[in-house]
Structures are given as structure tokens and as C-alpha cells.
Amino acid sequence: MQEDKTLIEVTGLVKKYGNHVAVDHLSFRLEPGKIYGFLGPNGAGKSTTMNMMTGYIGPTEGTILINGHDIVKEPAEAKRCIGYLPELPPLYTDMTVWEYLDFAAGIAVNALGYHYPGYDEALKAQIDKLLHILNAMKMTGLVDVAKRLIKNLSKGYRQRVGFAQAVLGMPEIIILDEPTVGLDPIQIIEIRSLIKELAKEHTVILSS
């Protein structure tokens, strides 16, 4: 773990929807190598804050630095550091688990320019992309269901697919919005164990 480093710095963050203030001058700093929680009732601004941190929506005021990169001014550089699992994972349920992760990895390369080793050579880049997919599947316990259609998986396993997509690029930061919502008690225990495993190599931010 790196010491004396600010991985995320949020300063004076404000988000307004008309006259409604969803986030009101929020400031905080997060260090690497820890699990952080955003706790609060519905409507407290947790998801809104996470959406701004990931660049999904822009702030009304304030700045967000991800590993020193401004999420508004340097979105590609900042987003390379982030893996994001929204409350409702945007899965394509007619794909198999493998097809979906291959699709997501391709988007990451084309949209964010992840520089996998050998990225400039097509064959090496493809091999490395496949290795990242396999690693993500092993981390999230999906190897045995790789060929199954996502629509035929339980909600717990669908959540695991979302986790795998979030860690594909091996980002420093993983942001999880309500990762256990709607799961049964056994699935919640499994997901919490998975979060602990991910936290060994990533900084994890979750809401509840």
C-alpha cells in the first residue's frame, strides 16, 4: 500500500437539479488500500456523489480529482483508475458471461485506451485482454458459468458479472453502489466476502 497519497480528493462538491440540492458542498479525501462506505438514507446523495466521481454526471460546482486527474477536465485519464458497479448492473442478458466480459473489455480498450501490455500490437493486445477476462472471472467465481446466458443466472451471479466487469482493467479504485441490494442473506454473505477479497488489491468505495 502506498503511503501519504491521496487517491481521491473531492472539494466543494455541489449538485443541483433545479431548486433541489442533491449534494451540498461535500469535501473529503480518500487514501489507497482501504474500504470506504457511504452510509445514509435514501435521498442522501450517495448515488449522486458516486455518479459524479465516476464521470457519469457532471457537478454543478466543485472538483473531483482521481489519482490527480480532474474527472471533468481529464475524463479518460481519471476513468482508467476506476471500476464502477452501479446499483442495477447494465448487463446484456442475452449474452453469455464470457461474451459480455469480452464485449466490455473491448469497450474499455476503445473508449478509455487501457494500455494493456502489447496494446500497440493487435495479437498481443487480444491475448492480454483475454487474460484480463480470465483473471476477473477467477476473482469473482464465474469460471464455471462462463458459457451460460446471463438471463439464466441467479441475481447473485448477475451481481458477480457486474463485479467482474468493474475489475476488468485492474483499476486502483472500485466503486460499488448498493452492491447487496435485493440479494438474499446467503448471497449477501458471498458478495461481502468478494468485496473483502477485492480490497486486498484495490481501494473499494461502497454505499449502503
Image: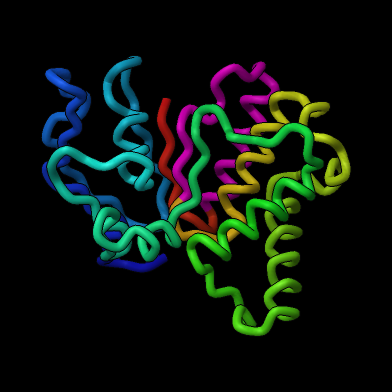
Closer-to-camera residue (31/132): 132
Left or right: where 115 falls relative to 156:
left
Query: Percent from the top left, x then y, of residue 195?
Result: 56, 41
Relative vertical location of residue 69 with respect to residue 85 in this rendering, above or below: below
Q: Which residues are magenta?
A: 174-199
Q: Nearer the viewer, residue 72 or 139?
A: 72
x and y, in percent, of residue 105 in the image: 64, 58
Q: Which image quarter holds the N terminus?
A: bottom left
101 and 68: which one is in front?
101
Whether residue 135 appears in magenta in the rendering, the answer is no
Which quarter of the picture shows residue 21? top left
Confirm whether the magenta stretch covers residue 184. Answer: yes
Compared with 200, 54 (above or below) is above
* Render colour scheme: rainbow
Q: Residue at x 19, y 32 (%)?
A: 15
Write the residue at 78% across / 34% down. 94
Whole-percent x and y of residue 107?
59, 56
